[in-house]
Image: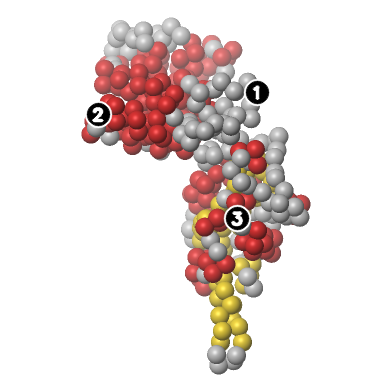
Amino acid sequence: MSKVNFSLTTSIDETKQLIKSIGATNTVVVVSEPGVGKSTILTMLKADMGEDEYDYIYVDCPVKDMMDIAASIPNHESKTLEYYVSSLFKMGNGKKKVIMLDEFMKSPKLMQIIYTRLMLERSVGDEQLPEGSIVFATSNNASDGVGDGMLAHVGNRVCLVSMRKPNHDEWNTWASANGIARPIRAWAAMNTKAFKSYLDPDQQDNPYIFKPSSTSKSFVSPRSLAKCSPIVEKRGEYTENALTVALAGTAGEAFAKSIAAFISLEGRLTKYEDIIKNPKTISVPDNVSALVMMLFEAIDKLDTQDTLNKYMDFVNRIPQEEIQSIFFTMMMRAKPKLARYNQEINKWATDNHQLL
């Protein structure tokens, strides 16, 4: 079996759109390092395309065997074999299918042959998928060292796409929309190197990220940061030591020690409501972590042009332009309609174009 490595990459949004656009005629095989969002693509497609025309089917390839996909069953009356397709594929309702073959390249060789027919011929065994059905697959980079390989002749018949890790802005846009705990989002905004890849140059000493050569099983990834959210949200139910151990066991010891300052600050921040009341006179904290936490609270709560104008009076008083730029970037990503038509936001962008 051949290993697959790439240099050209796409973002998760580009990957999703590519599958949506060509997935009915070309099978896209998405590869990336662990925890960067491959498995969420099916959910993204469902949100985009709806459920009126399509069924969305997840296949966990390494744990399936032949009988989980389809089987020949004896018909004793006719003394022949009849082909039965697994109910997993919902073949009886006539709807088009969007099928995700997750961890395809970790499948045993025999199962890869079966999945390859599904990818290339759009059929489950002898039964054809409805016209317009989409099939795509995911797996890890060969260099991740977790056992991914593809039959040599298959690569020339599919569209192999390497999906990069999201950067901190992209992840925080998703995190803000999905209710990820504020200390984690603030930490992510301030620790951009946690979104680097081991494939990037000069990352040997990066304490946060996945490295194939490392024996540690816990590291920072978009997935593990999201898993840390309920741990942070429920921290009042257990000791500080238990909190640190749980965070270390989910996203690594370096992350657990680093985020402690953000967590300790949350209960002592200047309230958003107080800033809106007195944006021109209320004190601006010296602590950068505190400021970033306050900005993320505002991004969650701002909902009118009037309150955004008032909050910009406060933002413009922050002495660090780089911190101001975090607010601008996240507002444009998280609430683009509100930000795009705000005169104060547009003025800030014009005055600080060198930062953008």
* Residue 202 image offset from top left, x and y in percent: 63, 20
Instruction: Estimate the x, y position of residue 179 in percent, counting from the top left.
Output: 37, 36
Q: Residues within 10 Å of mark 1 (few under 14, many from 20)?
A: few
Q: Is residue 25 left or right of residue 316?
A: right
Q: CA distance from mark 2 to mark 1?
A: 39 Å
Instruction: Provide the secondary structure element on which disc 1 rests.
Output: loop
Residue ID for mark 3: 107
Query: In the image, 229: left or right of 106?
Result: left
Q: Residue at x 52, y 50 (%)?
A: 42
Residue type beneath disc 1: Pro
Q: In the image as oriented, which residue stretches furthest toward the bottom?
A: 77
What residue is pinned by disc 2? 239
Question: Type of residue at label 3?
Answer: Ser
Q: Residues within 10 Å of mark 3 (few under 14, many from 20)?
A: many
Which residue is drawn at the image coordinates 61% and 87% (left, top)? Answer: 80
Answer above or below: position of 72 versus 321: below
- How far across and how far down the image is residue 91, in percent? 54, 70
Q: What's the distance in space between the residues labelled 3 and 1, CA to CA? A: 31 Å
Q: Is residue 278 above or below residue 213?
A: above
Query: Which corner quadrant holds the C terminus?
Result: top right
Can residue 173 be seen at all in this image of the molecule? no
Q: According to the image, label 1 marks what residue?
A: 201
Q: Nearer the viewer, residue 324 or 157?
A: 157
- If you read the primary sequence from the N terminus, does the residue marked by circle 2 or circle 1 appear first? 1
Q: Earlier in the sequence, mark 3 or mark 1?
A: 3
Q: Give the secondary structure at mark 3.
A: loop
Q: Residues within 10 Å of mark 2 (few under 14, many from 20)?
A: few
Q: Residue at x 57, y 50 (%)?
A: 103
Mark 2 or 1: in front is 2
Q: Is residue 74 above or below residue 269?
A: below
The amino acid beneath tag 2 is Thr
Furthest toward the left, the residue is 237
